[in-house]
Structures are given as structure tokens and as C-alpha cells.
Amino acid sequence: METVYIETTILSYLVSRQSRDLIVAGRQELTRDWWEYSRPQFECVISQIVIDEISAGDSFHSAKRLEHAAQLSAIAVTPACVELARGFIKRGLVPAKEVRDALHIAVATIWKMDYLLTWNCRHIANAHNLKQLRIFAQSHGHELPTVCTPEEL
């Protein structure tokens, strides 16, 4: 069974109130459909980083996010993950203020996930950044997972 690292934005879109923004509303619906119909076809995991992020904010919605996250296994953020994330930041591939984004990519890479599922198209699912991240990871003996949105997977 293929593996999917579920990044924080997926759980956020899954439980958030329906947006008035048509693009966001479409992404919310795609996320809900993927969660219900496609997720069972994969082994889906999260990390403590995701748990920390979804625990923040409005208590009602954070409880709903945590409820969905409880259905998933959590993988460890190892020293190798932290080291790879530091490399991404040091090379300027992820902004220094976005440590958690670098860690999501590093965790999914170190744990050899097939996919990293996200709606973060600024720092994670960004074609230009991914090319550079892939080159960097390969130069350090790692294979970046396929980074995509629920629409693509």
C-alpha cells in the first residue's frame, strides 16, 4: 500500500467552515471527497508537527482536527529529519521563518513516503521550489516524495 504524509493544511481544510472564497471552497470540497473516498486506498500518517499545528486555534475546530488525526499513525521527527530541514533552510529552499514547512518535507522524505499531501502551495507544493528541494535531497542520498494536493492524488 502506498504511503501518504498528511500535512496540516489537509486537516484544516477538512474541518473548516465552508469558505465564501470559491477557490478555497472548492479545495475544501476536494479535501472532504479525498478524505472519504481516496484516503482508504493509502496508508496515511502524520507527525508531531502536524499534531502541534492542528492543536492551535479555535478549540471547537482544533478538537475536530484532532479527532480526524487520531485515525492516523504518527511518525517520529528524528534527528535526521531535523538535519535535512536545516539543510533546506540553510540553502534558502524554505524560508527560515517556515521551519515547520521544512520539517514536513524532511519528515516525509526521511520516512520514504510515496506522497506528501498538502494545500500549502507557497512553500511546499511549489513547482519551482520542489525542483530545487529534489536536487538537494538527492545530493544528500534522499528521494523527495511526490508532493501534491488532494486534487492531484
Image (spheres, rainbow, N blue to C red):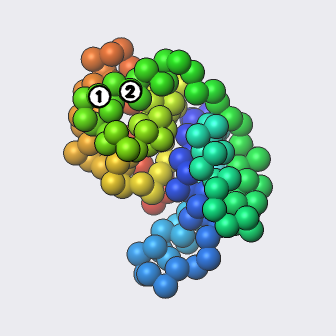
Q: Which residue is mark 1?
A: 90
Where does the image place residue 16, in percent across and percent down from the top left? 61, 70
Q: Judging from the image, what secondary structure is the residue with disc 2 in? A: helix
Q: Are marks 2 and 1 in contact (CB under 8 Å)?
A: yes
Where does the image place residue 88, in percent across and percent down from the top left? 33, 30
Where does the image place residue 84, in percent across and percent down from the top left? 40, 23
- Mark 2 surroundings within 10 Å by alpha-carbon count, few (fewer than 14), some (14 through 19), many (20 or more): some
**Residue 149 visible here:** no
Q: Judging from the image, what secondary structure is the residue with disc 1 in? A: helix
* Amino acid at the residue labelled 1: Lys
Comparing 125 with 84, the one in front is: 84
Cα distance in 3D space between marks 2 and 1: 6 Å
Tell me which residue sits at (47%, 51%) in the image. 118
Q: Which residue is mark 2?
A: 86
- Position of 69 with respect to 152 (left or right) is right
Q: Quarter holding the N terminus?
A: top right
Comparing 100 with 43, the one in front is: 100
* Amino acid at the residue labelled 2: Arg
Comparing 140 with 36, the one in front is: 140
Q: Is residue 75 above or below residue 70?
A: above
Q: Seen from this angle, which residue lies furthest front?
A: 97
- Position of 140 with respect to 20 (left or right) is left
Tell me which residue sits at (29%, 28%) in the image. 90
Q: Is residue 68 above or below residue 45?
A: below
Residue 37: image quadrant is bottom right
Tell me which residue sits at (38%, 26%) in the image. 86
